[in-house]
Amino acid sequence: MLFEFKTPTPLEQHTFKKFSFLLKRDDLIHKDFSGNKARKIYYYLHNFPKKIDTIISFGSIQSNAMYSLSIFAKAKGLKFRYYAHHIPKHLLQKPSGNLLAALKNGMELIEGYEKIKVQENELFINEGIANKEAYFGIEFLAKELIEQLETAKEYTIFLPSGTGTTALFLSKAFKMLQVNNFEVVTTPCVGDSAYLKEQFFHLESNPIYHPKIIDTKKRYHFGRLYQEFYQIWLELQKETKVEFDLLYDPKGWLALMEYKLYEKNLVYIHQGGVLGNETLKKRYKVFLQIKEQL
Ligand SMILES: *Cc1c(COP(=O)(O)O)cnc(C)c1O
């Protein structure tokens, strides 16, 4: 085995602001993978096309998916070429975080999506590993939850979305497995609800399989810093002793608090991403200091 994914991942009981919820610790699936990236990549672990020697993908410069793919490529002895829309100068001179780690794993980085080219010996993986093949691994996540929860009870299973692949396929898997008491709810972190719905349709044309979308009244832009993001992230860490991701989880928690999802039997999926916190924590430190001085 190339990788040992530690499954089933634990389901823990926690409290936050006096309400209790269950936390699915998919962040613990593998030390080098963001939780849901491990699930999404699982298919390729076991079904990798023989004539392929290179993986191609694209997306943001500090993406968790990029880092996970670099680990995967290295372990499989594959080349990995990644396209970023724009590479900030300071990162080119002094890479950090996910980018530094991915480059150390041998990733080749190219600026400009217009340069994306895929040859016969190369496998193209969509931004954020938003491929149909991701269903395979996410179905295992659904099966673990079915084992760990009571299928006769009603649960709200919440997770924040980027591409929406994880939430969509989790929702679909429950329906395919005929578990109708588990409702998957998500919130968009990239773009708005309409954009997320569109993403769902790219991967699944039948809307009965789509998860429910909620959104905060306030609009947040992906990758930007917000005082309330840091605050809820810190409060969560203090109360649960679990480190959440700083990019997606704060928006997720703000949305679920706004919609009072804690009044239901709530299961929160921790999708990993903590490795990416390193650079965000540094940025927040500067951001919050400047705010204080104002
Ligand atoms: C990638 C990622 C997401 C978004 O997953 P999608 O399947 O693209 O919606 C959410 N949280 C974390 C921590 C991630 O790394």
Image: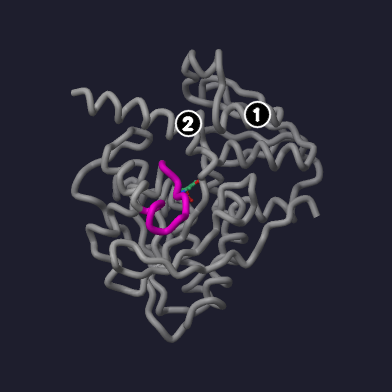
**Residue 279, numbered circle:** 2
Q: Is residue 30 above or below residue 80?
A: below
**Label 2: which secondary element:** helix
Q: Amino acid at mark 1?
A: Arg
Residue 207 visible to the viewer: no
Is residue 152 within the magenta segment? Answer: no
Inter-mark Cα distance, 1 to 2:
22 Å
Specify the farthest residue to the bottom.
152
Image quadrant in which you'd find residue 75: top right
The structure residue drawn at horizontal position 76% and vertical position 47%, both measured from the top left corner, is 49
Label located before the other in sequence (1 or 2):
1
**Label 1: which secondary element:** strand
**Residue 81, numbered circle:** 1
- Write the start and end of the magenta stretch as one range: 236-246
The structure residue drawn at horizontal position 38% and vertical position 75%, both measured from the top left corner, is 155
Q: Is residue 13 above or below residue 82?
A: below
